[in-house]
Amino acid sequence: MRKTFSFLAAVSFLLASAAQVNAGALSELSGQAGVKVSAPAKASVPAVSVPAVKVSAPKPAEKEQQAEWLVMVYIAGVNNLGLFGAASNNVNQMEKGLYEAGAAASSIKMVVEYGELASDGLGTLQIADGTKTLLVQPDNDFDNVNSKVIGISKNADTGNVRTLENFVRRVKSRFPAKKTALIIWNHGGGIVGIASDDIHGSMMNLKNLSATLKKLKGQFGKFDVLATDACLMQMASIAYEFKDYADVIIGSEQPIPGAGYPYYGMVRALAESGSRMSAKDFGAMLVEGYGYQYSGKSDTSLSAIDVSKLPVFKNKLNKWIGLLSEPENFKIVSKAAVLKEVTRMNSLDSSRDLVHMIQVVNRQTGVSLAAKAAGDDLQNYIKQVLIIRNYSSEPDNYGLAIYLPDLTYEANPYETLKFSADTDWSIFIRKILQSRLDNGW
């Protein structure tokens, strides 16, 4: 059993109340519009001309007093999530959380890059001219975002990594903190990427995002926490791609409902815990709060990963793959009937739960004892060491998905990722796909 973080007991009521605030603030959105779905479609609004990005030059400001935590939330809401109010709802939750934290709110800084596609309520789109940088302020008004605007970026493309990079550079330089977290908020598409902008028709691919995070690390050091409030992003290949840029990675194997993370409870727990909140504690706290909020809702999950454990995970994975690739084992595990049993991640058929795959393989008669032992060793390491905390509404979601396509192998982007270069997984799945071509699926 995982160790229980002592401070969580003291703030559990905050996490429970987060569910109530989220439920009251944003009614469940129906269909695809209510879920942060994978691989969003091209823009459905008329094309617009986009001049070069112009960032306003705010007056020079003295550095703020060092905070315990700086949390940067990159809200790329220039899509259906903005239209349905999810972006403004989440900022209002942050404001409410700081308000309820009282004097303790001074220990943290919440800064948001805020871009939103909105409607006037009569069906007319309101296209924001770029993004605003908000310093979140304590506020008891849940109907309006009243936080202080500290920067405006004209015509900024929220699906472009340069917009994210500029945001982090400005904020990190101005607001010193002992620990930092970056949350990327938007649609997620697994290995395809994250953060779509329907006006510019753009989306961040993982390779460009990785290069941007590398530059930011070179200037500011690693983030303590990197989280994706977006669907389908907690995959082994994605966590491995970002392993050098954060100590803890938080994300979901499954789709994330439109209401997103429990920001109200998160902000209160973060503020009121003070210096006791480590990066691992942050991960455990957010996962538990998410579990409170979506308890009973199907196909929901969130997990936090200890990035320092990924190198050993890689070695154990390669050992297991090597044994499965032996001819007698491979004949069994490559059968369509076997791999079709493995839990797939809702709308992304190529993403499957890794621990459940191990369990399915180990149930097969004829798989060698050595391969089963290596599989048990790998799944125990994932559940007991790599995963800090996992919540899932489903019994076969253990916190980490892996790329396992049915028939179509997405060589680009998959082959461009570090995971493909450093593990034998891509060789293994190409071998499986070749077997399917030879023997039928």
Image (tube, rainbow, N blue to C red):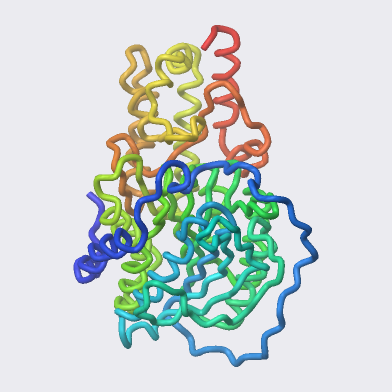
Count of numbered tags = 0
Q: Percent from the top left, x then y, of residue 35? A: 44, 47
The answer to whether residue 120 is seen in the rendering is yes
Q: Percent from the top left, x then y, of residue 171? A: 58, 77
User: Residue shown at 61%/51% (left/top)?
Assistant: 196
Please tell me which residue lies in front, 224 or 374: 224
Is residue 200 rendered to the left or right of residue 240?
right
The answer to whether residue 76 is seen in the rendering is no
Q: Percent from the top left, x then y, of residue 440? A: 54, 8
Please tell me which residue lies in front, 367 or 8: 8
Please tell me which residue lies in front, 91 or 391: 91
User: Residue shown at 32%/88% (left/top)?
Assistant: 103
Please tell me which residue lies in front, 436 or 323: 436
Given the current orientation, which residue lies at the most extreme top position?
A: 439
Q: Percent from the top left, x then y, of residue 229? A: 46, 56
In which image quadrant can residue 250 be found? bottom left
